[in-house]
Amino acid sequence: QVQLVESGGGLVQTGGSLRLSCAASGRISSIAAMRWFRQAPGKQRELVAAITSGGSTDSADSVKGRFTISRGNAKNTVYLQMNSLKPEDTAVYYCYGDLQQIGDYTFRGYWGQGTQVTVSS
């Protein structure tokens, strides 16, 4: 069974920083890409940033220059460094992984449980 567990959310003032972590565990044979999504109340879930197995990254225009996605040395951990936070960044942040389980012939998508980020004005 594959699990993605996020941590690092919390309450921060405008202009502050937070670092989110996501650790993938279980019978994983390969990771194609990891992504961070967020969902604010009453809004659709949106892609925030992504990183491929080769290390290529991309991020939404709304967070470019403020958020940075990276991987840990073990490559089953992904981080989202969030700087210069704004009230509009308030949302539940979810980790998503395109992972292949041992014995599986295809990659499947897995979601974490989410972590709340609240930016006060």
Image: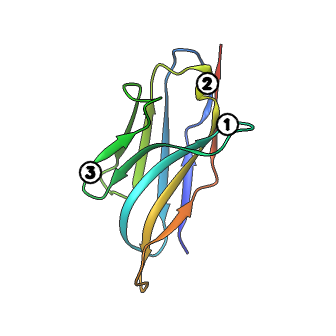
The label number, if any, that marks residue 55 in the structure image: 3
* Disc 1 secondary structure class: loop
Residue annotated with mark 2: 88
In percent of width and height, residue 42 lies at: 75, 38
Residue annotated with mark 1: 40
Res. 6 in view: yes
Residue 52 to residue 16: above or below: below
Q: Which class describes the residues within 10 Å of circle 2: few (<14), some (14-19), or many (20+)?
A: few
Q: Which class describes the residues within 10 Å of circle 3: few (<14), some (14-19), or many (20+)?
A: few
Real-space Cα distance between discs 2 and 3?
28 Å
Identified at 56% across, 20% down, the residue is 86
Query: Which three-letter amino acid code belongs to the residue tagged 2?
Result: Glu
Left-right relation of 12 to 49: right
Query: Which three-letter amino acid code belongs to the residue tagged 1?
Result: Ala
In percent of width and height, residue 84 lies at: 47, 19
Question: Do the numbered discs 2 and 1 sit on residues whose CB atoms are within 8 Å?
Answer: yes
Query: Which three-letter amino acid code belongs to the residue tagged 3?
Result: Gly
> Residue 1: which quarter of the image?
bottom right
Residue 58 to residue 81: above or below: below
Q: Quadrant of the C terminus?
A: top right
Identified at 63% across, 48% down, the residue is 114
N-terminal of the pair, mark 2 or mark 1, is 1
